[in-house]
Amino acid sequence: MSLSRYNFPIEMTRQKTIMAARMAIGTIISFIITTYFTLVEPTWVYISLFIILFEQHTIGASLTRCSMRAFATISSALYSLIIIFLFHNNYLMNLIGFVVGIFLYTYLFLGTKKSYIGILGCVTLAICLINYNNFSYVFIRPTNVIIGILIGFFTLRFFFPSRATKMLILEMQEFLAEYATLSIYLANIDDSTTDLPERLTQCESNILALIPHFQTLISETRVEIGKDSGFTQVAADILQSFRHIFRYYASIIALILYKGVILNEKDREHFIFLSNAMIQLKENLSYLKHTRNLVAAPDLMPQKDENLLSLMLSLLVTECSSLEIKINKLIRMAKVVKLE
């Protein structure tokens, strides 16, 4: 029976294969540990493992999820222990403590980037204060959760590790490839070209999809190499340049579509030059090498005049020159940042 009959798309990629293999390895390790040490309620080990590894592509993302899960579990377990100890496991007081704890976790973490702490804290309170109501189980749950977290991080760190720093560089290459393709497309448009609006819409869709992922990778990189690292600041500056470049491209396309501006041979040469420069910057990132004055070539700089297209091209080339400087700076930093 074919799965395609039920519209189950199966896409095998290297990333998915690695994540699935990592999940299987972590499960085997968890089974060995829980069986050998005969842990009580080993289910929580597996639950923590799956939450840590599922959809966590990088070490930075895993560390973030690990820290939030550990904090939520330990803090709510300690809170439950205090309630049970102070009020001698009185069910009414446990219920009151449970309601107060739910209020605190919801008030402190609702609508924040750490809302996962609030969700898990509430779940742990329900398990500890409403379900079990005794010291042993309140102690067992956080212990098993920590074991699952450690197994998950160990598996992610030592079995095909994926660092956000490396993923960030790959994402920059995606931006550059997108702009190189758009530049060569603009260089070859003529009166018979009719799909320019569709091309802009597709490019805009691709860029808008890359931006939030890029921002997420910056946050994960800060976790991996430190919040004060200059690497992440330069990466954020590069993202800003990518955004500016897209605005200039969009403005140029708007001039062509709505103002009837026609590209001359000099304009086409500029776009071809920009496409080649983007491709070269992409290759530089691939091999972590840099080339001086790749974009900032004075004889190729458009002259600022009353022509809006020339002005936009001038701004575009200037921004690309700034982007090259930032990428070269990032490449120098990447040589001392752990990428593997």
Image (spheres, helix red, strand yellow):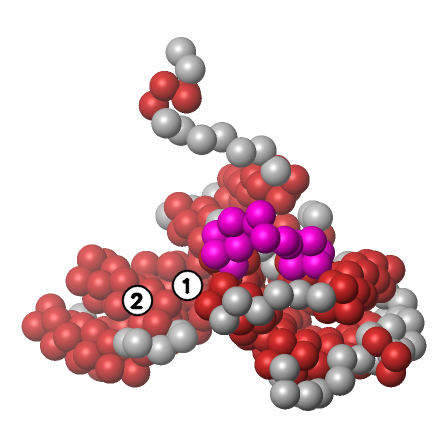
Picture coordinates of residue 51 (x, y %)? 45, 53
Q: Is residue 257 shown left or right of residue 241?
A: left
Which segment is the magenta one?
184-200
Vertical position of residue 51 compared to residue 33: above or below: below
Task: Please name whichever residue, 183 or 239, is drawn nearer the observer in this view of the structure.
Answer: 183
Picture quadrant where residue 84 is located: bottom left
Q: Amino acid at mark 2?
A: Ile
Q: Which residue is mark 1?
A: 142
Vertical position of residue 277 compared to residue 300: above or below: above
Task: Please name whichever residue, 125 or 173, is drawn nearer the observer in this view of the structure.
Answer: 173
Q: Amino acid at mark 1?
A: Pro
Picture coordinates of residue 231 (x, y %)? 72, 79
Residue in the image at 32% along x and 59% along y = 137
Q: Which residue is mark 2?
A: 119
Residue in the image at 69% along x and 53% along y = 188
Residue 303 located within the stretch drawn in magenta: no
Q: Callout 1 environment at 10 Å: few (<14), some (14 to 19), or many (20+)?
A: many
Residue in the image at 15% along x and 75% along y = 99
Disc 2 is placed on an element classified as helix
Q: Please count the marks in the image.
A: 2
Picture coordinates of residue 161 (x, y %)? 69, 54
Q: Callout 2 environment at 10 Å: few (<14), some (14 to 19), or many (20+)?
A: some
Residue in the image at 87% along x and 83% along y = 298
Residue 40 in view (yes/no): no
Residue 190 located within the stretch drawn in magenta: yes
**2 or 1: tag closer to the N-terminus:** 2
Q: CA distance from mark 2 to mark 1?
A: 15 Å
Residue sticking out furthest to the top: 1
Task: Please name whichever residue, 96 or 300, is drawn nearer the observer in this view of the structure.
Answer: 300
Picture coordinates of residue 26 (x, y %)? 58, 44
